[in-house]
Amino acid sequence: MITSNMLAEIADTLQIVPWPPQPDALLASAGVLILGALLGQFAERALGLPRVVGYSAIGMMVALAGFGLPEGRLPVGWRLVVDLALAVMLFELGSRVHLRWLRRNPALGLTSAAEWVLSLVAIYAVLRLADLAPADAAAAAVVLSIVAASVVGRVAAEAKASGQVTDRLMLLTALSTLYGVLALKVVSGWVRLGHPQFGIEAIAQPLYTFAGSLLLAALLARLVVALAPRLDLRDENGALLLLGLVLLALAAARALNLSTLLVPLAAGVMLRNATARPWVWPRHFGTAGGVLVLMMFVVVGTAWTMQTLEAGAAVALAVLLARGAAKGLVVVGLARWSGLEWRQGAALALGMLPLSASALVLLADWYVLHPESALRIAPIVLSAIMLVELIGPVAVQVALRIGGEGSSAEATRGGASR
C-alpha cells in the first residue's frame, strides 16, 4: 500500500516541488476558461440564451463560494483583463457608430441626450432619498446611467443582428458611455473645487483627459487606416495586428492617465466615420480577443459579496426601476419622431437595461480619485450590476427578437411561416 511518506519520497526523487502540488493562478485560469466555455455553450444550445449568461454565471458561482471581490476592488491582473477585453469591444462598437446619422435624424441625438439626462436625474433622486451625500449620489448616478457596451456588443454579435433597433442600440450605448466618462470627470472636478489645493487640477484634469484621449484615439484610427490597404484585417494575421494596435493604445492610455474607455470607443467612431465604407473584421479580433471577453465577464460576475448585497441591494433595486422607467419613457416617447414603430421603440428601451464592465471600470476609476466616496457607493453600484448581470443579456436578446433582427429572430419567423 502506497503511503503519503512514499509519495513524498517519490516526489523528492522526481524533483516535484512543492509537494503536494499547490494550485496557482494558471490552474485557476484554466478552470475558469473550461467551465466558462462549457457553461456558455450550454446556455446557448440547451437554453437558447446568449453565451455571456454562462460566462457571468461562472463568476457569480465564484462569488457565492465566498471569493467575490470586496467593494469591487479589482486586483491589478484582473483590472488588466477587463481593460483589454473592454477596449476590444468598445473599439468594435465604435466602428459601427455612424455619426452622419445624427445629422440626418436629429431626433436620435435628442433621444440619446434626453434618456441619459433623465436617467441621471432619476437615479440621483433615488440616491438622495436614500440619504447619500450630493457628491456620492452624483458619482453613483453617473456610473449607473450608462448602458453596458460589452453586453450589447456581445449579444448583438452572437445574434448577427442588424437593422434599425440594433444600430440605434449601438449608437445610444456608445453615446451613454461617452457621457458617463466625461460626466464622472466633471463630478470629480466639482468635488475637488471644494478643496483649495485642488483648484487648478479640478479644471485641468478633466480637460486633459478628454483632449488627450481624443488625440490618442485619432492616432490609433489613423494607424489603422494607413495599414488597412496593406493587410486584410479579416484574416488571422491582420486581426492580430489590429488587436496589437488597440492594446498599444490602451497601454498608452494607462501610462498617460487617460480614459481606457474613451480611447478605444472614440477610435472606433473616428475610424467608421473617416471612410464611407464599413469596416469588417473577425469578432473580438479572433480567438485571443474571445478569451479576454470570456474572462472579463467572469471577473465582472465576481465583483460582489453577500455583505455587498445586504448593504446595497434594496437601494440598487429602486435605482434600477427608476433607471429603466426614465430610459423607457424617453426612448418609447420619442420613437415615432425618430422613425421607429412603437414596438421597435419598446424593444430599444428593453435593450438598454444592461449594466456590466463599463460601470465597474468607472467605479474603479472613482476609487483612484476619491476612495472614501467610492467605498460609500460601491455596495449600491455592485448590487445593481449583480442584479442585472444575468437578466441584461437576455433583455438584449429579447429586444432584438421583438425588433425582428438577428439570426434568432429570423429562425423564429421561419418557424412561424412553416
Image (cartoon, rainbow, N blue to C red):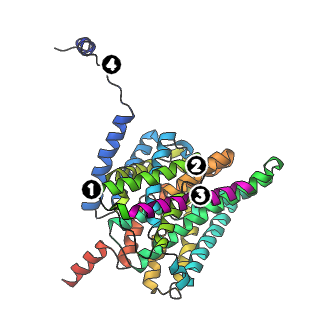
Place of residue 387 in the rendered image (x, y in percent of width and height, measured from the top left): 48, 58
Q: Which residue is mark 4?
A: 17
Q: Residue furthest right?
A: 196
Sequence-earlier tag: 4 or 1: 4
Q: Which residue is mark 1?
A: 42
Any part of residue 253 in sight: yes
Quadrant where the image shows the C terminus: bottom left
Q: Quadrant of residue 233?
A: bottom left
Q: CA distance from mark 4 to mark 1?
A: 37 Å
* Element carrying mark 4: loop
Sequence-earlier tag: 2 or 1: 1
Magenta stretch prevailing secondary structure? helix
Marks 4 and 3: which is nearer the front? 3
Q: Residues within 10 Å of mark 1 (few under 14, many from 20)?
A: some
Q: Which residue: 55% across, 44% down?
A: 73
Q: CA distance from mark 2 to mark 4?
A: 37 Å
